Amino acid sequence: MSPHLRLGVIAGIAALVLDQASKLWLLYVFEIARRGVVKVTPFFDLVLAWNVGISFGWFQNDGFLAQAALTTIKAVAVIVLAIWMARSRTWLATVALGLIIGGAIGNAIDRVAYGAVVDFALFHVQIAGNTYNWYVFNLADVAIVAGVAGLLYDSFLGVPAAKAP
């Protein structure tokens, strides 16, 4: 296994473990379902949200067929991303792909285990008496977004690929 691929696998495993550990702790140790909204800072709360849709709660449907379709699509995406990661030539792209894969697997585990993805982090701001909320998310989502940002950085500002003859 190449050093780049090893870094990608480590990033994916770390994202998956941190995501699942945070969710298990919040659900079964902290018992967030019993606590409701927990104010952590003036702009950040812990809340429990069961996301039966895809990213940012789009396409909400908790039917078995919809959940099976979303899980199948994720499985295919993870396979395609793993192939891309194995062929990646830069450490940044490889790590970024590992983060995306780890996050996708973490959310897929939730979908299989609970029928929905466990989301818990909520950022918000109050301006002129109005509260503006961001989407409720989890650490898998953070890994996916960080991975996409890494891929974008690598694509636009990373080391240019060697030109073919």
Image (cartoon, rainbow, N blue to C red):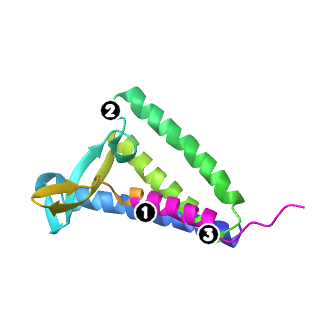
Left or right: residue 77 compared with residue 107: right
Vertical placement of residue 82 versus 39, above or below: above
Q: Residue at x 13, y 55 (%)?
A: 130
Mark-to-mark CA distance, 3 and 2: 40 Å
Question: Quick one: label 2, few (<14), some, or many (20+) residues within 10 Å?
Answer: some
Q: Which residue is mark 3?
A: 157
Left or right: residue 91 compared with residue 66: right
Per the picture, the main secondary structure of the magenta-coloured stretch is helix
Q: Secondary structure at mark 3?
A: helix
Q: Position of residue 72 (x, y in %)?
A: 51, 36
Mark 2 residue type: Asp
Q: Position of residue 138 (x, y in %)?
A: 34, 57
Question: Which callout, 3 or 1, points at the residue further toward the start of the chain?
Answer: 1
Quarter location, residue 129: bottom left
Image marks 3 and 1: residues in contact by CB distance under 8 Å: no
Q: In the image, which residues are magenta? A: 142-165
Q: Secondary structure at mark 1?
A: helix
Vertical placement of residue 78 versus 97, above or below: above
Left or right: residue 71 compared with residue 165: left
Q: Which residue is mark 1?
A: 17
Q: Can residue 162 be found in the magenta stretch?
A: yes
Mark 3 residue type: Leu
Q: Residue at x 46, y 56 (%)?
A: 103
Q: Work out whether residue 118 or residue 125 is closer to the camera in this orientation and state it.
A: 125
Q: Position of residue 3 (x, y in %)?
A: 68, 72
Q: Secondary structure at mark 2?
A: loop
- The mark lying in front, picked from 2 and 1, is 2
Q: Residue at x 31, y 50 (%)?
A: 118
Mark-to-mark CA distance, 3 and 1: 30 Å
Mark 1 residue type: Val
Question: Which callout, 2 or 1, points at the residue further toward the start of the chain?
Answer: 1
Q: Work out whether residue 30 or residue 5 is closer to the camera in this orientation and state it.
A: 5
